[in-house]
Image: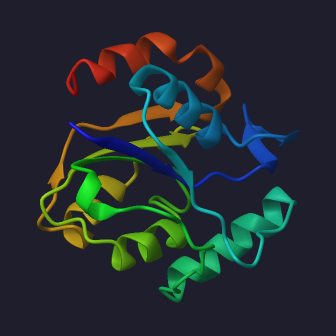
Amino acid sequence: MNPVVVYFSHAGENFINGISKKVSMGNTEVLAHKIVNRLNCPLIQLKEMACYPESYDETVKCAEYEKKENRRVAYQKIELDRSKIDTLFLGYPNWWGSYPRIVATFLEDFDTDGLAIYPFCTHEGSAFGSSMNELKTQCPNADIRSGLPVRGSRVERADVAIENWLLAYK
């Protein structure tokens, strides 16, 4: 198998254990690194062209607007040769009950036909929300596998959950 991990994460202020807290690395990025360390595969970060605000509240407002308006969110060009991968580990924070619009834009641009997709997300209580159903709708010809939702406040302690989840892959 030829896997790759593609993720979007937001640093700055994050909502952790009921309060806004500044972090230098987003929770989803922490989780993505833990997964890559076990899979020994390429890691690709989706980076927005116009940065989200550092403020948690402002980012939430921006994400809400993007979702309501079904916006395409431009991201920096990534190097990903579709012919060389068969498995996509896709990571994102749960924003407004699903994946952020930057992830939706990536999925619109990238050929997911025939791919096995293992979603993982960080959240503070809403798990995947409706993102698994939305992923199946957006990628109808992909094989959407079991996902891994991890509370952002517990991401540093998610090693056993990651190992157990990856058993389905290996």
Residue depicted at x 72% and y 73%: 61
Pinpoint residue 2: horizontal percent, then vertical percent.
27, 41
* In-image side of 112 versus 47 (left or right): left
Task: Decide if residue 79 is in sight here.
Answer: yes
Residue depicted at x 67% and y 71%: 48
Q: In which quarter of the image is residue 153?
A: top right
* In-image side of 43 versus 156 (left or right): left
Nearer to the camera, 47 or 136: 47
Q: In which quarter of the image is the N terminus?
A: top left
Q: From what the image shows, is residue 150 above or below residue 89?
A: above
Pinpoint residue 129: horizontal percent, then vertical percent.
40, 52
Nearer to the camera, 85 or 63: 85
Q: In which quarter of the image is the C terminus?
A: top left
Q: From what the image shows, is residue 7 above or below residue 51?
A: above
Residue depicted at x 62% and y 34%: 152
Q: From what the image shows, is residue 143 above or below residue 16?
A: below
Pinpoint residue 119: horizontal percent, then vertical percent.
35, 45
Nearer to the camera, 29 or 36: 36
Q: Quadrant of residue 20?
A: top right
